[in-house]
Image (cartoon, rainbow, N blue to C red):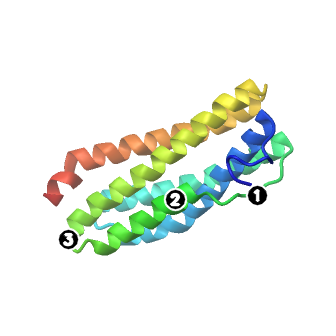
Amino acid sequence: MGWFTSDIKTMDDLFVHTLQDIYYAENQILKALPDMIEKATDAKLKQGFQTHLEETKGQIIRLEQVFEMHGAEKKGVTCPAIDGIIEEANDVAGEVDDKQVLDAALIAAAQAVEHYEMTRYGTLVAWAKVLGRADCASVLQKNLDEETATDKKLTALAESQINAKAT
């Protein structure tokens, strides 16, 4: 079911579809993070990715809770956006020989992922509230808060040392 198909008829359908989209995305991110951890050379960056790997596992569990709370089938729908972001990150990382430049590229790729997730979670929180599902909104807000915090940590790491080392 794509974003603009006739399968989405109601706001509830759109909410569930977007929930399935981010569920797929989180599972793809869970698969991609170990490779990013392996490629990172800066110890703080490596640790940050490791921490986010654990957070991602928790976010998936929360999404499964929202599916259950909302009475929707727990499944993902292919998300070309996250697939493209991850593919681009792999392409760029494969082209960088300088390890310090690679760390800067990995941060940029991770932030592209974070920004995608933040848009999805922000939308889902707003829609859950409109649908009268404050319970779902509160669970989804926890994921949004973690994604926002991760993005801020990545920015601080990039600005405090990674980017300067790459120049």
From the viewer's side, name the closer residue of 56 and 47. Answer: 56
Labels 1 and 3: the sequence-earlier one: 1
**Cβ–Cβ below 8 Å for labels 1 and 3?**
no
Work out whether 37 lies above or below 129: below
The numbered mark at residue 98 is 3
Taking the spot 74% from the left edge, 49% from the top edge, the residue there is: 5
From the viewer's side, name the closer residue of 66 and 53. Answer: 66
Separation of residues labelled 3 and 2 (CA atoms): 25 Å
| Label 2 SS | helix
Instruction: Name the residue that disc number 2 marks.
Output: 53
Q: Answer few, some or many: residues within 10 Å of disc 2's Cα (few below 14, many 20 plus, some between 14 and 19).
A: some
Taking the spot 57% from the left edge, 59% from the top edge, the residue there is: 80
| Label 1 SS | loop
Residue type at mark 1: give it: Lys
Residue type at mark 2: give it: Leu
Labels 2 and 1: the sequence-earlier one: 2
- Outermost residue on the left side: it is 167
| Spot occupied by residue 95 in the image (x, y as percentages of width and height) | 29, 73
Residue type at mark 3: give it: Asp
Taking the spot 44% from the left edge, 71% from the top edge, the residue there is: 35
Instruction: Name the residue that disc number 1 marks.
Output: 75
**Cβ–Cβ below 8 Å for labels 3 and 2?**
no
